[in-house]
Image: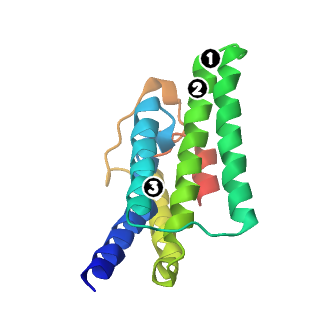
Amino acid sequence: NHLDVIRRWTIAAVAAVLLAGPTALAFFTGGYFEGPRVWAGASVWACVLVLVMIGAQLPGGRWARLALGGLAALAAWSLASMAWAQVAGDAFAAAQIVILYTGTLLAAALVLREARIRRWVEPVLALGTAVVVGYGLAGRLVPGVLHFARSISAEGRLEQPLTYWNAMGELA
Protein backbone atom coordinates (compact mmCIF):
# COMPACT_ATOMS: atom_id res chain seq x y z
CA ASN A 1 0.00 0.00 0.00
CA HIS A 2 1.33 3.41 -1.00
CA LEU A 3 0.19 5.11 2.22
CA ASP A 4 1.97 2.52 4.33
CA VAL A 5 5.23 3.25 2.51
CA ILE A 6 4.80 6.98 3.06
CA ARG A 7 3.99 6.37 6.72
CA ARG A 8 7.06 4.14 7.20
CA TRP A 9 9.39 6.70 5.56
CA THR A 10 7.85 9.53 7.56
CA ILE A 11 8.37 7.66 10.81
CA ALA A 12 11.97 6.89 9.80
CA ALA A 13 12.61 10.56 8.96
CA VAL A 14 11.13 11.74 12.26
CA ALA A 15 13.17 9.13 14.12
CA ALA A 16 16.32 10.39 12.39
CA VAL A 17 15.55 13.95 13.49
CA LEU A 18 14.89 12.82 17.06
CA LEU A 19 18.02 10.70 17.26
CA ALA A 20 20.26 13.37 15.71
CA GLY A 21 18.74 16.11 17.86
CA PRO A 22 20.81 15.60 21.02
CA THR A 23 24.06 15.59 19.06
CA ALA A 24 23.10 18.70 17.12
CA LEU A 25 21.98 20.49 20.28
CA ALA A 26 25.27 19.61 21.98
CA PHE A 27 27.06 21.78 19.40
CA PHE A 28 24.90 24.73 20.45
CA THR A 29 26.13 24.71 24.07
CA GLY A 30 23.73 21.93 24.93
CA GLY A 31 20.74 24.22 24.56
CA TYR A 32 21.89 26.51 27.35
CA PHE A 33 20.89 29.64 25.45
CA GLU A 34 17.37 30.49 24.37
CA GLY A 35 17.81 30.38 20.59
CA PRO A 36 18.91 26.74 20.32
CA ARG A 37 16.31 25.73 22.94
CA VAL A 38 13.55 27.35 20.90
CA TRP A 39 14.71 25.69 17.67
CA ALA A 40 15.02 22.31 19.37
CA GLY A 41 11.59 22.66 20.95
CA ALA A 42 10.00 23.75 17.68
CA SER A 43 11.64 20.82 15.88
CA VAL A 44 10.49 18.28 18.46
CA TRP A 45 6.93 19.58 18.55
CA ALA A 46 6.87 19.64 14.72
CA CYS A 47 7.86 15.96 14.86
CA VAL A 48 4.97 15.31 17.26
CA LEU A 49 2.58 17.09 14.90
CA VAL A 50 3.78 15.07 11.90
CA LEU A 51 3.45 11.83 13.84
CA VAL A 52 -0.08 12.67 14.96
CA MET A 53 -1.00 13.62 11.39
CA ILE A 54 0.07 10.21 10.08
CA GLY A 55 -1.86 8.43 12.83
CA ALA A 56 0.93 7.32 15.15
CA GLN A 57 -0.53 6.00 18.38
CA LEU A 58 0.59 6.54 21.94
CA PRO A 59 1.32 3.52 24.07
CA GLY A 60 -1.91 2.75 25.87
CA GLY A 61 -0.36 1.98 29.22
CA ARG A 62 -0.99 3.99 32.33
CA TRP A 63 2.76 4.46 32.95
CA ALA A 64 3.27 6.18 29.60
CA ARG A 65 0.39 8.54 30.30
CA LEU A 66 1.64 9.14 33.84
CA ALA A 67 5.14 10.03 32.59
CA LEU A 68 3.79 12.39 29.94
CA GLY A 69 1.29 13.90 32.36
CA GLY A 70 4.00 14.38 34.97
CA LEU A 71 6.26 16.20 32.54
CA ALA A 72 3.36 18.33 31.30
CA ALA A 73 2.48 19.22 34.90
CA LEU A 74 6.11 20.11 35.61
CA ALA A 75 6.13 22.35 32.53
CA ALA A 76 2.95 24.09 33.70
CA TRP A 77 4.40 24.51 37.21
CA SER A 78 7.63 25.90 35.79
CA LEU A 79 5.69 28.44 33.73
CA ALA A 80 3.55 29.35 36.74
CA SER A 81 6.69 29.84 38.84
CA MET A 82 7.49 32.91 36.75
CA ALA A 83 4.95 34.69 38.98
CA TRP A 84 7.05 34.29 42.14
CA ALA A 85 10.56 33.60 40.89
CA GLN A 86 13.20 36.21 41.69
CA VAL A 87 14.32 36.06 38.07
CA ALA A 88 11.33 35.30 35.85
CA GLY A 89 13.63 34.74 32.87
CA ASP A 90 15.31 31.81 34.63
CA ALA A 91 11.92 30.26 35.38
CA PHE A 92 10.92 30.70 31.74
CA ALA A 93 14.17 29.08 30.58
CA ALA A 94 13.53 26.13 32.89
CA ALA A 95 10.00 25.85 31.50
CA GLN A 96 11.34 25.86 27.94
CA ILE A 97 13.62 22.95 28.81
CA VAL A 98 10.78 20.95 30.37
CA ILE A 99 8.54 21.68 27.36
CA LEU A 100 11.37 20.43 25.12
CA TYR A 101 11.70 17.26 27.23
CA THR A 102 7.92 16.72 27.18
CA GLY A 103 7.81 16.97 23.40
CA THR A 104 10.80 14.67 23.09
CA LEU A 105 9.23 12.04 25.33
CA LEU A 106 5.93 12.29 23.46
CA ALA A 107 7.62 12.01 20.06
CA ALA A 108 9.73 9.09 21.27
CA ALA A 109 6.64 7.33 22.62
CA LEU A 110 4.96 7.79 19.24
CA VAL A 111 7.90 6.71 17.08
CA LEU A 112 9.56 4.00 19.16
CA ARG A 113 6.64 1.64 18.89
CA GLU A 114 8.31 0.50 15.68
CA ALA A 115 10.81 -2.35 16.34
CA ARG A 116 12.85 -1.38 13.27
CA ILE A 117 13.37 2.09 14.77
CA ARG A 118 14.16 0.83 18.28
CA ARG A 119 17.10 -1.19 16.91
CA TRP A 120 18.81 2.06 15.86
CA VAL A 121 18.39 4.05 19.09
CA GLU A 122 21.44 2.86 21.03
CA PRO A 123 23.93 2.81 18.14
CA VAL A 124 22.91 6.26 16.87
CA LEU A 125 22.94 7.86 20.32
CA ALA A 126 26.28 6.19 21.11
CA LEU A 127 27.73 7.51 17.85
CA GLY A 128 26.45 11.00 18.64
CA THR A 129 28.00 10.80 22.09
CA ALA A 130 31.33 9.70 20.60
CA VAL A 131 31.26 12.61 18.15
CA VAL A 132 30.52 15.20 20.83
CA VAL A 133 33.01 13.81 23.36
CA GLY A 134 35.66 13.29 20.69
CA TYR A 135 35.23 16.84 19.44
CA GLY A 136 35.45 18.24 22.95
CA LEU A 137 38.52 16.22 23.87
CA ALA A 138 40.29 16.90 20.58
CA GLY A 139 41.08 20.43 21.71
CA ARG A 140 43.02 19.00 24.66
CA LEU A 141 44.38 15.75 23.28
CA VAL A 142 45.40 16.85 19.78
CA PRO A 143 45.67 20.64 19.89
CA GLY A 144 45.89 22.24 16.50
CA VAL A 145 43.81 19.62 14.68
CA LEU A 146 40.58 21.47 15.38
CA HIS A 147 40.59 25.21 15.91
CA PHE A 148 38.33 26.28 18.72
CA ALA A 149 37.27 29.81 19.50
CA ARG A 150 38.70 30.85 22.85
CA SER A 151 37.20 33.33 25.25
CA ILE A 152 38.66 34.90 28.35
CA SER A 153 35.49 34.10 30.30
CA ALA A 154 36.00 30.33 29.88
CA GLU A 155 39.17 30.49 32.02
CA GLY A 156 40.41 27.04 31.01
CA ARG A 157 37.14 25.17 31.27
CA LEU A 158 35.77 23.24 28.30
CA GLU A 159 34.27 25.80 25.99
CA GLN A 160 33.04 23.69 23.09
CA PRO A 161 30.79 21.93 22.45
CA LEU A 162 29.00 21.66 25.83
CA THR A 163 30.80 24.46 27.76
CA TYR A 164 31.48 22.44 30.93
CA TRP A 165 33.53 19.35 31.63
CA ASN A 166 30.77 18.18 33.99
CA ALA A 167 28.28 18.16 31.11
CA MET A 168 30.77 16.29 28.95
CA GLY A 169 31.29 13.73 31.71
CA GLU A 170 27.55 13.24 32.11
CA LEU A 171 27.14 12.76 28.38
CA ALA A 172 30.01 10.29 28.24
Q: Amino acid at mark 2?
A: Phe
Point out residue 47 in the picture as x, y percentages from the top left corner. 41, 56
Tell me if mark 2 has few (under 14), some (14-19) or many (20+) residues whose alpha carbon lies within 10 angstroms of its own.
Answer: some
Tell me if mark 1 has few (under 14), some (14-19) or many (20+) residues whose alpha carbon lies within 10 angstroms of its own.
Answer: some
Judging by the rendered image, the residue that carries numbered circle 2 is 92
Point out residue 96 in the picture as x, y percentages from the top left corner. 55, 35
Marked residue nearer the N-terminal end (2 or 3) = 3
- Residue found 62% across the figure and 54% down from its top: 169
Tell me if mark 3 has few (under 14), some (14-19) or many (20+) residues whose alpha carbon lies within 10 angstroms of its own.
Answer: many
Marked residue nearer the N-terminal end (3 or 1) = 3
- How far is the residue under mark 3 from the one under mark 1? 28 Å
Judging by the rendered image, the residue that carries numbered circle 3 is 48
Q: Residue farthest to the left?
A: 2
- Residue found 45% across the figure and 24% down from its top: 152
- Judge by depth and name the residue closer to the eye, 130 or 17: 17
- Judge by depth and name the residue closer to the eye, 40 or 166: 40
Element type at marker 3?
A: helix
Judging by the rendered image, the residue that carries numbered circle 1 is 88
- Judge by depth and name the residue closer to the eye, 153 or 101: 101
Q: Is residue 131 visible?
A: no
